[in-house]
């Protein structure tokens, strides 16, 4: 069995090339630019890891992984336009560097390039991969739209937020694992267990993300503590506080959001503490982590083959940044 | 052989339904909205006509036609955002009605839906159809980027404009015919002749478009005469005038563009007339029309089968609006 690091390096060596023609540089250079902002390539590595649960990896894992990584980058370009974000991981966003119109088009050609890579998957696995890919692509768009809708809503319920964040962030990780299983030759049951493993792990990851924003160590996260609170984001934590704090505390939250005082983060954290938001979110994370692990347990391959995915899950849960 | 009208009706009956889920209406209603602005559905009908040159049409023609029509509408939504256009065919554009962010996402899910339809084409034709579709999708994006680049350039050559307009508008019609030939079971030679027929017909169509803007009958076109001149667009006509008019006339064009006088259209048309732009553009249109017809002639099927495509070509050339 190969490790996350092994696969990450294997993928990167092949992916780290120009994916676009050299003509029409005003369109393709901006598209290539964002691929240079290297991430962890977690989604393609999930394809490799799930594939290797069942069968040695071959070109299919690369093409499926590349298509998902390109789709992910397409969604980042378009999300950054919508969010008017000037920076991503400290680097200038595509629309900020090249203008919104070019970024929009660069995203579009990135999407086509994702499909170009996907279409190179072996014919026997291709229809199933395309079907999962299309379903997931639509869900990611739905998640982004719901996120924008929620900004305009006064109240968002736990279930609504859970659904939105699942669509926006978890299903692509889930689909990566599922597609990996498909091209590893796994049956439908195992494909579904890997999907659920990824989906629930993604939710646990997001709970941790929301938690770290309020309770993390700013020196480790590299982000301003309470960034979500300052931006009035409806996170798992805020939604729980809204549902379980006293009416007085709820009114105080309204006022803090309205008046934006300089001690807003401190005051909101006091309310969070009064209704045990920190402990609750830790339990919530554990809940989804355990559901994820149960699905991995249920995958019908010998236990030693699952070690790398178990490690990946544990690393994601333990992270402090 | 069935006529354009027959196929247009057949396609419309099946296409005129909701293409998107009913949940998440904030995303999918805007996507569905633009499909209600009915066009001539010329691209899907081209799929049907090219298919029927070789073989009776079946479901493949619908799925391929629907995917191309959805792709076309995706590109309209995104182009309208880029052009900041409030109206399309007299109807409010998606971004004007629902906001830019939602329009961007609605375009994205429309694109996924295009691929969903394409993936339903029979397995034996699917790889070739996907390959043509992806190549064309990238070219359409390139064309739109070049069009935006040209707005910032002082001079655009005839060849540059021809390349841009071919990518932006002709290749999708060409690909529709080529894909129709593929699913009709045609060989590569015939596929290519139909592609070239469509590409050259598209160019002739665009020459006519530019011509009608300057010399058409406003009562028939329904557009303001000289709209391109007012907007300082670099059209076939303007590019020819720039290349062949006197240095004095060129300086006058510079001044007219700079100062935007109320009689600008009249003055530019005088310069156009001085260098016979009208006659030249009529000849240019004929040139591409004849190249197109030659390729249709070279398609290896009995002549009577080609009548509907010849009619379509003639109708597009004779149009006054």
Image: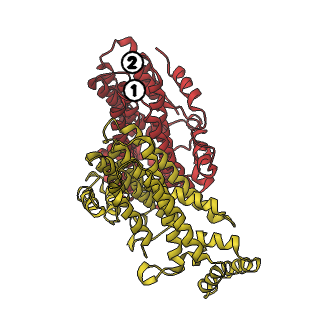
Chain colours: A yellow, B red
Q: Residue at x 59, y 27 (%)?
A: B13
- Based on the displayed image, in which of its 4 quarters is residue A124 positioned? top left
Q: Secondary structure at mark 1?
A: helix
Is there CB contact under 8 Å for labels 1 and 2? yes
Q: Which mark is residue B168?
A: none
In the displayed structure, would residue B61 be above or below residue A105? above
Residue A62: x and y in percent read: 29, 50
Which residue is denoted by mark 1 in the rendering?
B180
The residues bearing labels 1 and 2 have C-alpha atoms spaced at a distance of 9 Å
A185 horizontally vs B46: left or right: left
Q: Residue A71: in sight, yes or no? A: yes
Residue B190: x and y in percent read: 30, 23
Q: Earlier in the sequence, mark 1 or mark 2?
A: 2
Q: Residue at x 66, y 63 (%)?
A: A157
Q: Secondary structure at mark 2?
A: helix
Q: Which mark is residue B53?
A: 2
């Amino acid at each position: 069995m190969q490790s996350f690091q092994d696969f990450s390096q294997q993928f990167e060596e092949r992916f780290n090339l120009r994916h676009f023609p050299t003509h029409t540089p005003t369109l393709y250079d901006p598209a290539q630019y964002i691929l240079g902002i290297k991430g962890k390539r977690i989604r393609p590595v999930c394809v490799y890891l799930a594939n290797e649960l069942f069968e040695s990896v071959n070109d299919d894992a690369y093409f499926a992984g590349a298509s998902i990584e390109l789709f992910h980058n397409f969604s980042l370009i378009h999300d950054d336009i919508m969010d008017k974000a000037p920076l991503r991981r400290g680097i200038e966003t595509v629309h900020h560097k090249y203008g919104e119109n070019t970024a929009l088009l660069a995203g579009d050609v990135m999407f086509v390039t994702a499909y170009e890579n996907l279409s190179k998957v072996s014919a026997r696995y291709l229809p199933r991969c395309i079907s999962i890919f299309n379903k997931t692509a639509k869900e990611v768009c739905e998640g982004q739209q719901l996120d924008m809708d929620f900004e305009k809503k006064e109240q968002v319920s736990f279930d609504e937020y859970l659904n939105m964040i699942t669509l926006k962030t978890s299903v692509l990780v889930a689909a990566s694992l599922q597609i990996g299983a498909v091209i590893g030759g796994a049956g439908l049951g195992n494909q579904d267990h890997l999907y659920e493993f990824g989906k629930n792990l993604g939710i646990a990851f997001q709970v941790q993300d929301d938690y770290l924003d309020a309770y993390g160590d700013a020196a480790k996260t590299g982000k301003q503590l309470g960034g979500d609170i300052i931006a009035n984001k409806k996170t798992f934590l805020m939604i729980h506080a809204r549902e379980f704090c006293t009416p007085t505390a709820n009114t105080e939250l309204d006022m803090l959001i309205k008046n934006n005082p300089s001690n807003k983060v401190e005051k909101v954290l006091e309310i969070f503490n009064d209704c045990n938001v920190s402990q609750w979110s830790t339990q919530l994370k554990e809940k989804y982590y355990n559901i994820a692990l149960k699905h991995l347990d249920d995958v019908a391959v010998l236990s030693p083959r699952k070690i790398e995915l178990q490690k990946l899950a544990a690393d994601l849960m333990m992270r402090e940044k």
